[in-house]
Image (spheres, helix red, strand yellow):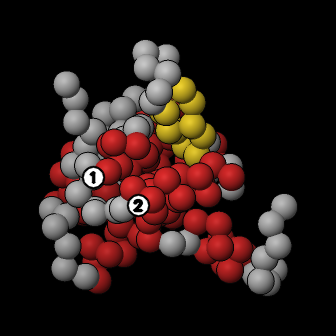
Amino acid sequence: MAKHRSGCPVNISLEVFGDRWSLLIVRDLMVRGFTTFQDFVESGEGIATNILADRLRRLQQCGIVTGEKDENDGRRVIYRLTEKGIDLAPVMLELLLWGAEHEKTGAPPAAIAELAKDRRAVVEETRRRWRERDPTPLLPWLGGRKTA
């Protein structure tokens, strides 16, 4: 177990997943259907490959993400949230809603209102997609996984 600066749950949470890139990777796995290193590189966020590799490794070490060899291409790793990772769904939803309410974003106001109307249903749908390994983007306007 890692040594933390304090026993404060907020501090510990931020030490585990609190940097911007880690949260964006979790978002992309959770709502955009991303599964591969290349998906993250092409996400439009501009993450450097060395930072991406480091954050994916850290998220795996913390038990938030798993990486498995692709059955069709052994050189490729398929990333997936763990149960611990999918438990961040309510946090991610609240960050999204907070940002859309307090800052100018590209999120469609009608879509935000729909998400805010029934938070529980949004979180349950996120969990269902995770359980069923459904890669369909939860929020299509956020930009999803490119399909061939």
- Can residue 99 be seen here? The reply is yes
Farthest top residue in view: 72
Q: Residue 134: where, in percent of width, then height?
A: 40, 29
Q: Left or right: where does residue 119 sit relative to residue 85?
A: left
Residue 26, placed above or below residue 138: below
- Can residue 109 be seen here? The reply is no
Disc 1 or disc 2, which is closer to the eye? 1
The quarter of the displayed image where residue 144 is located: top left
The quarter of the displayed image where residue 4 is located: bottom right
Query: Residue 61 or 96: which is nearer the viewer?
Result: 61
The residue beneath circle 1 is: 43
CB of mark 1 within 8 Å of CB of mark 2? Answer: yes
Q: Left or right: where does residue 126 sit relative to residue 54?
A: left
| Residue depicted at 15% across the width and 62% down the height | 108
Q: Amino acid at mark 1?
A: Ser
The residue beneath circle 2 is: 24
| Residue depicted at 49% across the width and 17% down the height | 71
Q: Which element is circle 2 on? A: helix
Residue 111 is labelled as none
Query: Tag 1: Cα neighbours inside 10 Å, few (<14), some, or many (≥20)?
Result: some
| Residue depicted at 65% across the width and 73% down the height | 15
**Of the image marks 1 and 2, the number of the one nearer the N terminus:** 2
